[in-house]
Image: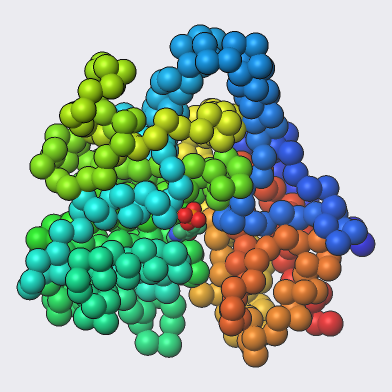
Amino acid sequence: MSIEIPDHVMELDRRDSLAGFRENFNRPETFNGEKCIYLCGNSLGLQPAEAEEFVRLEMEKWAKMGVEGHVKGKYPWMPYHEFLTEKMAEITGAKKEEVVVMNSLTVNLHLLMVSFYRPVPGRFKILIDYHPFPSDRYAVESQIRFHGFDPKDAMIELQPEPGTAYVSKKQIEDTFDRHGDQIAMTLIGGVNYYSGQLYDMKFITDLAHKHGAIAGFDLAHAAGNVPLKLHDWGADFAAWCSYKYLNSGPGALSGIFVHERHAKRFDLPRFAGWWGHDKETRFKMGPDFVPMPGAEGWQLSNPPILPMACMQASLNLFHDAGMEALRKKSKKMISLCEELVKDLEGEKIELITPKNPEERGCQLSIRVKDARRDLFDRISARGVIADWREPDVIRIAFAPLYNTYAEVYEFTQILRDSIDE
Ligand SMILES: *Cc1c(COP(=O)(O)O)cnc(C)c1O
């Protein structure tokens, strides 16, 4: 069943300076037998068409050169992670020395907490996000127990305004007023995975610092979604994955940020491995660990080249498009969607993502009245790939690199039809 797109929506696509980027992605053409509308870039970003070629290059190098590939070819493996750093720093608003790509997200959260969660009696609490991603909660709880504290006393969860999913600045301030002198560290999502709320990370960082706490962020839903200025905001550390908005492939690698003020904090506890060892002397294979300054000093292992090759293809696209332009388009897409479903709000659905464009990224979380999961099943049957979060939320994301305004319109029509069915 094809949907007729109104002129004013087609015009938005015609005028879209980023429209050409869609062709740089491979995407599912059909889903459930219908034309696919892919709105799940917040869960797994689509495949950059160039990714295969970047991977092929490294497969070929391995085939033809064996171990020599570490030092030869266009992108020698030894410094391969360095080819990603600059563009990742661009995306996160960091200095090159503050960023490195390594491991997976939850692994990195642990490694960073080893260094930055230093509880003492009297100051041992971790402030986590409202409705945190389960992995973050498990990681934080286990760190707290590891240090001999009880998560029941030591883990505080941000609370939303009563009856909503919205965490106001007032709620955050009140939490610090109540627990401030006991909070050792924060681990807040830059964008909340459930509600899609974008936090003011500078505000949280300043507040944490004012109260003597370390400001850490999980940017899984923020990196590649909204412009970040980690260095200027002064965050202490952050980590994010790259398979969501950053389109680097299933299970792809994570990035970390460590502010330059900690670059030479060799006194901090850290779990060490040879890849964090000073580059110049690493291959002397000596017995003493000499950490590199900056984020690279947190690396453990020599990195997996193939997922990094995928990431190169993706980061090139972000570099070419620019986060500011992407942000501009994603704001317009979300506003269009909001406008088109306005009349459905109230009785049938409720948007739990903040209305203020400065407080959200490119995800909308739609709470379905009476937890009608059949509504989600119906839109799926019409070709929409979105996701369902128990008990009653449909999450959709319009990724400005590859989604179109026409898809925004199609989605809203499908939602409308499905509600009426
Ligand atoms: C996606 C996501 C994760 C997933 O962690 P992995 O270690 O990459 O499996 C963790 N935390 C948040 C907030 C996420 O959105």
Apparent side of residue 101 relative to residue 352 in the rendered image (left or right): left
Task: Give the residue at x 60% y 67%.
Answer: 395
- Image coordinates of residue 225 in percent, x first then y, are 49, 49
Q: Is residue 149 above or below residue 96?
A: below
Location of residue 297 by image quarter: top left
Which of 21/183 is in front? 183
Which of 381/167 is in front? 381
Quarter containing the N terminus: bottom right
Task: Give the residue at x 20% y 58%.
Answer: 117
Task: Give the residue at x 17% y 47%.
Answer: 269
Q: Is residue 391 above or below residue 145?
A: below
Which of 345/25 is in front? 25
Apparent side of residue 170 relative to residue 323 in the rendered image (left or right): left
Quarter containing the C terminus: bottom right
- Image coordinates of residue 9 in percent, x first then y, are 72, 52
Residue extending furthest bottom? Answer: 370
- Whether residue 348 is visible, yes or no, is yes
Q: Is residue 364 above or below residue 14?
A: below
- Image coordinates of residue 383 in percent, x first then y, are 81, 61
- Image coordinates of residue 246 in percent, x first then y, are 53, 43
Which of 313/407 is in front? 313
Q: Is residue 163 above or below residue 101?
A: below
Total number of numbered discs in the rendering: 0
- Whether residue 236 is visible, yes or no, is no
Apparent side of residue 335 relative to residue 404 in the rendered image (left or right): left
Apparent side of residue 415 relative to residue 217 in the rendered image (left or right): right
The image's colour scheme reads rainbow
